[in-house]
Image (cartoon, helix red, strand yellow):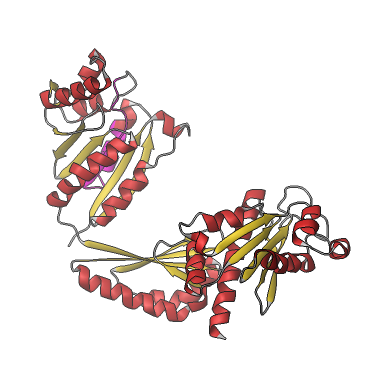
């Protein structure tokens, strides 16, 4: 079965100026993939008739479906409808059902329909109107030379409702598409290049209809297996077989399967083992606690945190020995070990975790440059400390530290189970 390809065109100077973020394209890409439609390109263009026409000409050379958002408002800078009318060599005609929808919306608001809004009900004669139940700009569906063009408003909630109710079901009925299934494998603690080396033999042996993508992030790599075929059941079995092979090659780096983030995976481990945890944070300033509490139900295992940013707080609240701070400094293995051990005792939890470092951009020394960070894990049997050197900007240093601390918890819990 041949692939069905789509292209997404977003129209609006506000996107190009960076005044708004284009979230429409990402959402549409996800929904189209579920139907077995491959998005080949996403393009953002200005409110210019020439740019819109050129984008349509380019898109039809590589896509079967061209989805357009933006430029359907009532003001003079909204050009999309007029450009499409000229592009498909048609003319505008009043569409009474659309006018009735617009009138109903204005009646609910207690105001009269303006002439500008009435003009929105004039649609190209050759299009099939796409009803907009949440706004005043109807969508338009065109077909030409085997291609489908759909124009929708740029307002996300209006576009999503139109796509969900009308456009996606009609695309599914119009095109015969293959099944496309994704499997996501979450890894951490291994660089993309090293991971690729470890997986090279397995990757080369993948069937032609199954592809692997490496999606790196701050402290790890998401692996995405994508399979395409006619039979969803067979495809699911094939993908699962490959995932099982992968789990045998890099077991210690995999922390989850599917769209599960690290803090959720660690939280699941804590719940499964009936453990509790508290954090003592200096350089991360509560960001690690934020990671834990961003997960619903985290009160089952996360007891609390102390942000001991100043040394006085380390001494007063965490009972870090003043001699430790004087002899080794706040950013040291000795200090962070005491922080982890003492926060565990203070909160009476199974586990204590601590961070202390120089996030930057200032505060570094020749011996301890910016990015020098210590983290520690403590339970009733052991305390483990780890030195990080990650000289990026301040926010990245903080985020990276939290992720590595979460991974240290994961690794420590796995080691406990193995014992």
- Residue 364 in sight here: no
**Magenta segment:** 53-74
Query: Quarter holding the N terminus?
Result: bottom left
Q: Is residue 66 magenta?
A: yes
Look at the picture and state if 59 lies above or below 254: above
Relative side of 301 to 327, left or right:
left
Q: Nearer the viewer, residue 175 or 263?
A: 263
As displayed, is residue 381 above or below residue 366?
A: below
* Residue 155 located left or right of residue 130: right
Residue 270: give x, y in percent of width and height.
Answer: 52, 70
Q: Residue at x 50, y 65 (%)?
A: 267
The answer to if 153 sits in the magenta stretch is no
**Closest to the observer: 200 or 77?**
77
x and y percentages locating residue 38 in the rendered image:
28, 54
Give the percent coordinates (x, y) of residue 281.
68, 57
The reply to whether residue 362 is visible in this rendering is: yes
């Amino acid at each position: 079965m041949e692939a069905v390809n789509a292209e997404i065109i977003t129209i609006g100077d506000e996107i190009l100026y960076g005044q708004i973020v284009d979230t429409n394209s990402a959402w549409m890409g996800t929904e189209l993939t579920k139907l077995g439609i491959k998005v080949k390109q996403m393009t953002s263009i200005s409110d210019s008739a020439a740019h819109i026409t050129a984008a349509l000409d380019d898109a039809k050379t590589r896509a079967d479906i061209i989805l357009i958002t933006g430029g359907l408002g009532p003001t003079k800078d909204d050009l999309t409808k007029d450009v499409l009318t000229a592009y498909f060599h048609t003319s505008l005609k009043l569409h009474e059902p659309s006018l009735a929808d617009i009138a109903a919306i204005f009646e609910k608001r207690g105001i009269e329909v303006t002439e500008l809004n009435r003009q929105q009900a004039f649609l190209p004669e050759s299009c099939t109107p796409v009803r907009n139940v949440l706004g005043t700009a109807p969508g338009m569906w065109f077909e030409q030379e085997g291609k489908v063009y759909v124009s929708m408003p740029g307002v996300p909630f209006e576009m999503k409702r139109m796509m969900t109710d009308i456009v996606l079901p009609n695309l599914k009925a119009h095109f015969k598409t293959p099944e496309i299934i994704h499997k996501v494998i979450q890894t951490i603690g291994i660089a993309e290049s090293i991971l690729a080396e470890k997986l090279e033999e397995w990757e080369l042996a993948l069937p032609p209809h199954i592809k692997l993508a490496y999606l790196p992030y701050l402290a790890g790599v998401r692996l995405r297996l994508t399979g395409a075929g006619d039979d969803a059941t067979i495809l699911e079995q094939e993908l699962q077989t490959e995932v099982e092979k992968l789990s045998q090659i890099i077991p210690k780096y995999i922390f989850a399967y599917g769209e599960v983030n690290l803090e959720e995976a660690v939280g699941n481990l804590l719940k499964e083992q009936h453990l509790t945890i508290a954090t003592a944070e200096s350089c991360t300033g509560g960001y690690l606690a934020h990671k834990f509490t961003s997960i619903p139900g985290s009160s089952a295992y996360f007891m609390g945190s102390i942000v001991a940013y100043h040394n006085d707080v380390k001494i007063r609240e965490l009972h870090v020995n003043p001699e430790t701070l004087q002899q080794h400094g706040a950013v040291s293995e000795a200090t962070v070990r005491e922080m982890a051990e003492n926060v565990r005792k203070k909160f009476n939890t199974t586990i204590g975790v601590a961070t202390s470092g120089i996030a930057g951009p200032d505060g570094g020394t020749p011996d301890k440059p910016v990015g020098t960070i210590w983290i520690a894990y403590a339970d009733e049997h052991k305390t483990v400390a780890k030195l990080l050197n990650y000289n990026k900007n301040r926010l990245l240093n903080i985020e990276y530290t939290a992720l590595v601390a979460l991974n240290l918890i994961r690794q420590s819990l796995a080691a406990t189970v193995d014992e």
